[in-house]
Amino acid sequence: MRKWIPLLIVAAALLASIVVYQDLPERMPTHWNLSGEPDDWSPRAWGALMGPFMIAVVWGLMRWLPTIDPRRDNYAKFAGTFEGIMLAVMMFMLLLHGLTIRAALGYPVAMERVVPLGVGILFIVIGNLLPRARPNWFVGIRTPWTLSSDRVWEKTHRVGGRLFVLGGILIALSTFLGASWSTGVLIAVVVVCSLGAVIYSYMEWRREKVAMPARAGPPQGG
């Protein structure tokens, strides 16, 4: 059943657009600023189909990338985690599509609150899944140091997962403090999670390099 969930998500987005298509305005809002005010509009056809199209593209891309990954064999070791990350991203995109349709129909939508809340939940879900990811070139925290050492990959994803979960909680809670707070917290969390993971992976790689001669032991005399 699980393999059909991505198709159901794409179908749900497309069905939502088809059902309300005749009620949508000729030009509909498709982008909002940080204050939750629409600042870009698109023709009805593109506005209605953009969501399903982008969700389908993400689905296809995440199916295709493992086939060209030099470490493709590792995907079998975290197949459930990979599926979970893909579904979380697709569900978030479905939420955005639903909000876009609702706003275009004239219903009030607090984008400045709902979107950051969705981002926070997405961070929490991905943070819980990250420690189970195995080394690959496309999914996870990919730095020169995690890609060069499986041990560094494992430790970085364990710490990075905790950062993502904590950051997601902070983002979700900030939505109750107003748009300016949620925007600031969102930016801060992204910066801290990104820099924190990069710095930690480098430090672990350095520790590994320093420890290698010690583990190898002193050279044997003649």
Image (tube, rainbow, N blue to C red):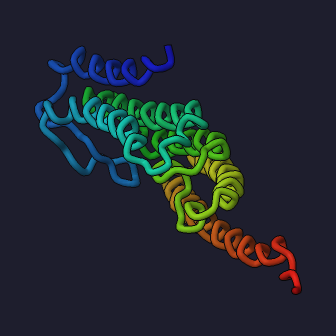
The location of residue 134, given as percent across then percent down, is 60, 46
The location of residue 10, given as percent across then percent down, is 33, 24
Query: In the displayed image of the protein, which residue is found farthest to the front?
Result: 222
Quadrant in which the C terminus is drawn? bottom right
Query: In the displayed image of the protein, which residue is found farthest to the bottom?
Result: 222
Residue at the spot 47% in from the left edge and 35% down from the top edge:
86
Residue at the spot 18% in from the left edge and 25% down from the top edge:
24
The residue closer to the viewer here, 67 or 119, is 67
Residue at the spot 88% in from the left edge and 85% down from the top edge:
221
Residue at the spot 14% in from the left edge and 32% down from the top edge:
44
- Eyeballing the image, is 209 above or below 68? below
Does the image show residue 55? yes
Does residue 88 appear left or right of residue 176 in this picture? left
The location of residue 172, given as percent across then percent down, is 60, 44
The location of residue 197, given as percent across then percent down, is 62, 63
Does the image show residue 184? no
The residue closer to the viewer here, 53 or 154, is 154
Does residue 190 appear left or right of residue 204 in this picture? left
